[in-house]
Image (tube, rainbow, N blue to C red):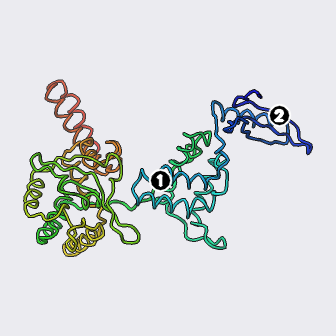
Amino acid sequence: MAKRRPSGDGMVRKTPSGRWEGRIVVGHKKNGPPIFRYVYAATQRELLDKLHRAIENYQDVELTEDCSLTLGEWLDRWLEEYKTETVRSSTLSGYRGYARNYIKPILGDKAISKITPADVQEMYNQLKDHGRVQKDDIHGQGLADATINRIHSMLHLAMKDAETVHIIAQNPLDQVANPKPNYKPMQILNEEQLDAFMAEVQKDEQWRDFFYTELTIGLRRGEICGLKWEDFDETAGTLKVQRSASVKKAGELVVGETKTDRGTRKIILPPTTANILRERKKAALTEWIFPNPLHPEEPMSPGRAYNHMKTLLKRAGLPSIRFHDLRHTFATHALASGVDAKTLASILGHTNASFTLDTYTHVTGDMQKRAAEIVGDFMADIFGEELKPWQESEKAAKAQSA
């Protein structure tokens, strides 16, 4: 039996055509034969440089024979075997669309183990400039940065799993800049606008509880539509968020898991919100806290909630904002009122407090200013007379600049 060649073992030779060829062992097939990776160059010195880089890249790597899969073949397997039972149906549908419409037409036929960061970046550039490849190689409108960002996130996950099961040596997307999404700026209802909106909500008996709850705990649209009475602990005054309602393209209403693992959370309700839900539960005829008025056996449709919000805004003479901006409105006023970022992150279902602070930087500046004033007053109380020289010099500097 032939001795098994170790990964990283290399060989150099000059081909009959005069080019230099190098190869290294990057893994082994199931029955033992080695899997080679080849590099070529015009001179021996150039080849040795390439070969050394390849050996470094494949050091301590043991690829399987699946490294010969094309990217398209791997994406099909990944979606079916890795994601079908682990993500929401809407997320899976989105992943399949990204693979089918954007990734496969450009890189789908290339061996996954030969995909480079430059290949991925070139794909992003093409999608940004021309959009998807259509019939007869006719291109459509370029994609928004936010769409490319989502494609990047999905492809990064697929390549990470390929690396984990030794189909590729390293994830090429680790070396590709994640395009920053150009989302529409959030629109926040200020105190006066919020008062006007709530005044209009109070007139609408059918929707009053729904929008009051939304503006006091800031749920995602699918989350508030997917609430059941089993999620509400009327004794403790808490609400467990553990599912989300969404609508497929065909119009089918589905209820699945929350957007993220952190999305499943328990919220301590404000007393007024808890009381509203207690009263509402007394007359409940269905398992849903906010059922569809026409089909109470179903949850409220997220689309119906969005459309009615637009109606209320119009009646109140307010700007036409997105439903998600109600969540932003809650979060902004909560931070401004002194709720700490970590607590707010747990209410919103964010991964960590730093994400919350990054999202609401428009209010954290004022928070830092207030914190500085509090610290200044606190230190003045402690040191008293000792701080007077600095305080007087500060007053003088302000007077001089004025």
Label 2 crowding class (10 Å Cα cut-off): few <14, some 14-19, many 20+? some
Helix, strand or loop for disc 2: strand
Question: Taking 204 as reference, is 34 left or right?
Answer: right
Asked where in the image residue 29 lies, by quadrant, the reply is: top right
Residue placed most toward the observer, 391 or 222: 222
Disc sitting over residue 12 in the figure: 2
Residue 269 drawn at (x, y percent): 15, 50
Question: Is 402 above or below relative to 138?
Answer: above
Residue 297 drawn at (x, y percent): 22, 67
- Residue beneath the point at 49% across and 55% down: 149
Residue 94 drawn at (x, y percent): 46, 60
Looking at the rendered image, the quarter that the N terminus falls into is top right
Question: Taking 297 as reference, is 138 left or right?
Answer: right
Residue 130 drawn at (x, y percent): 59, 66
Question: Taking 152 as reference, is 212 left or right?
Answer: left
Closer to viewer: mark 2 or mark 1: 2
Helix, strand or loop for disc 1: loop
Residue placed most toward the observer, 181 or 232: 232
- Residue beneath the point at 30% across and 57% down: 244
Q: Amino acid at mark 2?
A: Val
- How far apart marks 2 and 1 lie (CA) works out to 43 Å
Question: Taking 163 as reference, is 391 left or right?
Answer: left
Residue placed most toward the observer, 12 or 50: 12
Q: Is the Cβ of the residue at disc 2 closer than 8 Å to that at disc 1?
A: no
Residue placed most toward the observer, 168 or 41: 168
Judge whether residue 252 can be spotted in this image. Answer: yes
The residue to which callout 1 is attached is: 180
Judge whether residue 402 can be spotted in this image. Answer: no
Q: Earlier in the sequence, mark 2 or mark 1?
A: 2
Label 1 crowding class (10 Å Cα cut-off): few <14, some 14-19, many 20+? few
Q: Amino acid at mark 1?
A: Lys
* Label tally: 2
